[in-house]
Amino acid sequence: MVSLGTPCDLGGNDLPPNTPPVNHDEPDGTGPSWHPFKSQAQFELADFIFRCDQMSGGRIDELMDILATMDEGGTPPFSNHKELYGLIDAISPEEKWECISINHADVERAQMDGTSTANLPTWKQGDYNIWFPLLLVSAPRGVRLSEGRGQNNQQPTPNDNNKRVVVFLCGSGR
């Protein structure tokens, strides 16, 4: 059975039948907005470098140097990896990401015991980075959101809107 969806607005509300598509063009009528990128080509290059190839910062800088030599004005699509990362972050500026590095518990046990990790499989010996979005929660004054085992129980500080903001991670609590 195939179920067809109905067009909706940004809030998820169904639009009336025969509603024309939303115009996503720039206000000056020059075509679709690729903001914060300058063009569709710049967006697609960023997507290829960052998501598809997962190129390192050093390699991005090297590629931009090569592309600059191919341009008559010597201008690469991005000046370096920091500019590229900044544009990617500007897509959803309200969403902040954090990274933690983890390794297998057997490595930690070996380090605590002072024993060698040489007999462990290589996948257990590696450090792994996990990227996750930070969850920002606004709470009224006097409410402690960080109650519980293994969590930081410090009282949050007020922000500019006179609300308290707490940054926390959800977990199993084990």
Image (spheres, helix red, strand yellow):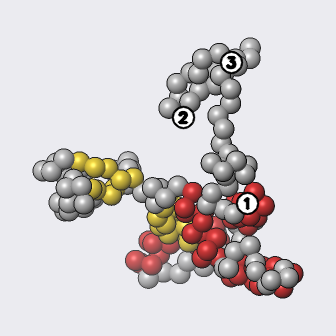
Element on which disc 2 rests: loop
| Residue at image coords 75%, 78% | 76
Measuring from the top left, give residue 136's x and y in whole percent.
Answer: 36, 53
| Residue at image coords 62%, 48% | 27
Dot placed on the residue nearer the N-terminal end, 2 or 3: 2
Measuring from the top left, give residue 12's x and y in whole percent.
Answer: 53, 29
What residue sits right under mark 2 in the picture?
10
| Residue at image coords 41%, 78% | 113
Q: Is residue 19 above or below residue 80?
A: above
What residue sits right under mark 1 in the picture?
39
| Comparing labels 2 and 3, the label whose residue is closer to the camera | 3
Q: Nearer the viewer, residue 146 or 106?
A: 146
Measuring from the top left, give residue 85's x and y in whole percent.
Answer: 60, 69
Disc 1, disc 2: CB below 8 Å? no
Measuring from the top left, give residue 43's x and y in whole percent.
Answer: 71, 60
Is residue 1 toward the left or the right of residue 28 in the image? Answer: right
C-alpha distance separating marks 3 and 1? 31 Å
Q: Mark number for residue 18? A: 3
Is residue 142 toward the left or the right of residue 146 in the image? Answer: left
